[in-house]
Image (spheres, rainbow, N blue to C red):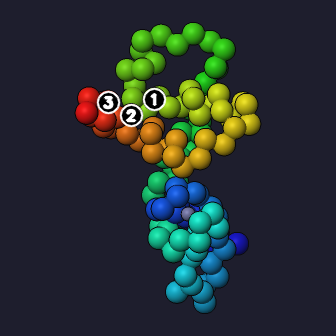
């Protein structure tokens, strides 16, 4: 099956779409918010896999030491994992916060 991964640029939703060879010009619409502002996730697929990997390795009952936070890729992962365990959907807003935290921009906002 010609399955492709897409990410919505507007709401951050990731979804899989079947695009048949004769449908190359098919307009992909986000199932979450109906936006056409979506992009294909090809190169980033492995990135997402590895984040899933890290997520699955996190033990939320264990103590986290300082070295955990020195890897900024871990910022937000713990919260995500915890939310997964609780069955909470943090939504795209949370992803935005994590992105800001990872890039350090979140500090700019607090300093305003
Ligand atoms: Zn969307």
**Distance between mark 1 and mark 2 Cα atoms:** 7 Å
Residue depicted at 42% across the width and 12% down the height: 66
Residue 110 in which image quadrant: top left
Residue 10 image point, x, y percent? 48, 62
Residue depicted at 45% across the width and 58% down the height: 43
Tags 1 and 3 touching, CB below 8 Å: no
Nearest to the observer: residue 31 or residue 18: 31
Which residue is tagged 2?
101
Residue mark closest to the camera, 1 vs 2: 2
Residue depicted at 41% across the width and 41% down the height: 99
The answer as to whether callout 3 falls within 8 Å of ligand 1 is no
**Distance between mark 1 and mark 3 Cα atoms:** 17 Å
Which residue is tagged 1?
75
Nearest to the observer: residue 11 or residue 85: 11
Tell me the tag on residue 110: 3
> Crowdedness of circle 2 by 10 Å Cα count: few (<14), some, many (20+)?
some
């Amino acid at each position: 099956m010609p399955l492709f991964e897409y990410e919505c640029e507007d709401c951050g939703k990731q979804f899989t779409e079947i695009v048949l060879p004769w449908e190359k010009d098919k307009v992909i619409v986000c199932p979450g918010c109906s936006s056409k502002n979506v992009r294909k996730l090809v190169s980033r697929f492995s990135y997402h896999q590895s984040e899933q990997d890290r997520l699955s390795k996190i033990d939320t009952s264990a103590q986290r030491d300082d070295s955990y936070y020195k890897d900024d890729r871990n910022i937000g992962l713990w919260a995500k994992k915890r939310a997964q365990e609780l069955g909470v959907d943090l939504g795209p807003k949370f992803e935005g916060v994590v992105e800001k935290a990872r890039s350090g921009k979140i500090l700019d906002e607090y300093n305003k």
